[in-house]
Image (cartoon, rainbow, N blue to C red):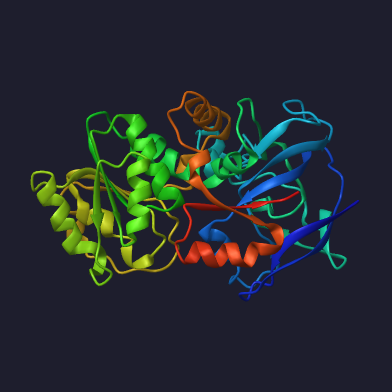
């Protein structure tokens, strides 16, 4: 049993750092010493869901121990975590929908304890902790030279953005793409669209600093939206005027703002593809006229991630200099500064903030 430091939430808006107990790995499990953990908007959502848990679902570190049945990693290996811990056997897994697995693998609740009681780990990872025990499916070996800080954000922000472009929308070379929101996910949509060969990538945001970052990651055009532009309808008309009055081939929402859930539909041409990539889970009102005509609206989970395929692809693109990963990390924090990291994320200060765990 290990005594570990972790960032926890009480489920009612509070985040704090305390000690938890972590058991050794059992069959098909891996014990990982976390070196870096990304900070994501979903962490903030989890702070208000009424359940006490360890936060964090973007993590990278070093394998400490493995249980029976684990052969793809060994103690000492550098790894990153993903949360699509698919079983490989259920209805969805048999159809290749690994991110939709109906029987995700994970250690039972009581294997990690806070004050003697089993505690939930966010996404069955709880990466904001010095050590975590996870299912073997959550662990991907790092076979390229990359910092832990950059590697950890591959686990969600990069995978969600990249997968939304490559797996969900299937962006074609020479196409036009609009990206609403140039935060952690949006920047990865932008650079994935560039890698996919999009001829025009238009970044939309209300924050000028984020638009500067968007240009660094491959945006060809920048649009500073007005805060009072409801549903970005005026912005949509501006974008249509920029690309021949028709609308873009693809548009992606990456803000996690419910009011903008339908915004990509206003940006795309007839028979275009609109993608809600940020994971909005609230009820919103939709003007069905936005779907006219033959538009496709996709709400992919985790970029339709297939970890064993997509993570090596992303790392290979990084190794070739085609994806920016180190540049995504704009500020590093200690684990004790987790509350500040959340505040900075909400303020839009960073592309990605990362907790560095000694």
Return the x and y of residue 88 as percentages of the image width and height: 62, 34
In the displayed structure, 21 sits above or below 213; it is below
Return the x and y of residue 70 as percentages of the image width and height: 77, 30
- In depth, the one of 146 and 152 nearer the eye is 146
Which residue lies most toward the right here? 1
Q: Quadrant of residue 231?
A: bottom left
Return the x and y of residue 269 as percentages of the image width and height: 16, 46
- In depth, the one of 180 and 337 nearer the eye is 337
- Give left or right: position of 26 versus 344: right
Residue at x 54% of width, y 56% of height = 40
- In depth, the one of 149 and 180 nearer the eye is 149
- Give left or right: position of 238 versus 99: left
- In depth, the one of 155 and 351 nearer the eye is 351
Which residue lies most toward the bottom here? 12
Q: Is residue 28 visible?
A: no
Q: Is residue 173 visible?
A: yes
Q: Quadrant of residue 48?
A: bottom right
Return the x and y of residue 55 as percentages of the image width and height: 66, 59
- Give left or right: position of 63 versus 101: right
Residue at x 30% of width, y 42% of height = 219
Residue at x 16% of width, y 63% of height = 234
Task: Count all numbered tags in the image, as a single digit.
Answer: 0
Residue at x 77% of width, y 36% of height = 63
């Amino acid at each position: 049993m290990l005594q570990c430091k972790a960032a926890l939430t009480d489920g009612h808006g509070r985040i704090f750092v305390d000690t938890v107990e972590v058991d050794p790995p059992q069959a098909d499990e891996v014990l990982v010493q976390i070196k870096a953990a990304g900070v994501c908007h979903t962490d903030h959502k989890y702070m208000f869901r009424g359940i006490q848990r360890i936060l964090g679902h973007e993590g990278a570190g070093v394998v400490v121990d493995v249980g029976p049945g684990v052969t793809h990693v060994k103690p000492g290996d550098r790894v990153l975590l993903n949360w699509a811990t698919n079983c490989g056997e259920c209805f969805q897994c048999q159809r290749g929908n690994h991110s939709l697995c109906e029987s995700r693998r994970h250690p039972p609740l009581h294997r990690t304890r806070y004050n003697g009681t089993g505690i939930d780990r966010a996404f069955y990872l709880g990466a904001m902790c010095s050590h975590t025990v996870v299912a073997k499916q959550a662990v991907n070996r790092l076979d390229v030279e990359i910092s832990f800080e950059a590697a950890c954000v591959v686990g969600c922000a990069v995978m969600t953005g990249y997968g939304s472009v490559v797996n969900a929308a299937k962006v074609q070379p020479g196409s036009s793409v609009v990206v609403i929101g140039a935060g952690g996910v949006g920047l990865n949509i932008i650079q994935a669209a560039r890698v996919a060969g999009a001829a025009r990538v238009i970044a939309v945001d209300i924050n000028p600093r984020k638009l500067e970052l968007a240009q660094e990651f491959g945006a060809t055009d920048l649009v500073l939206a007005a805060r009072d532009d409801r549903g970005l309808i005026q912005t949509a008309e501006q974008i249509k005027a920029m690309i021949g009055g028709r609308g873009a081939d693809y548009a992606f929402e990456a803000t996690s703002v419910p009011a903008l859930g339908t915004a990509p539909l206003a940006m795309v041409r007839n028979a275009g593809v609109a993608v809600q990539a940020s994971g909005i889970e609230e009820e919103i009102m939709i003007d069905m006229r936005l779907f006219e005509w033959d538009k496709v609206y996709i709400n992919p989970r985790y970029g339709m991630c297939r970890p064993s395929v997509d993570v090596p692809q992303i790392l290979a693109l990084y190794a070739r200099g085609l994806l920016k990963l180190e540049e995504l990390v704009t500020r590093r924090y200690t684990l004790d500064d987790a509350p500040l990291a959340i505040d900075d994320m909400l303020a839009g200060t960073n592309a990605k903030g990362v907790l560095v765990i000694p």
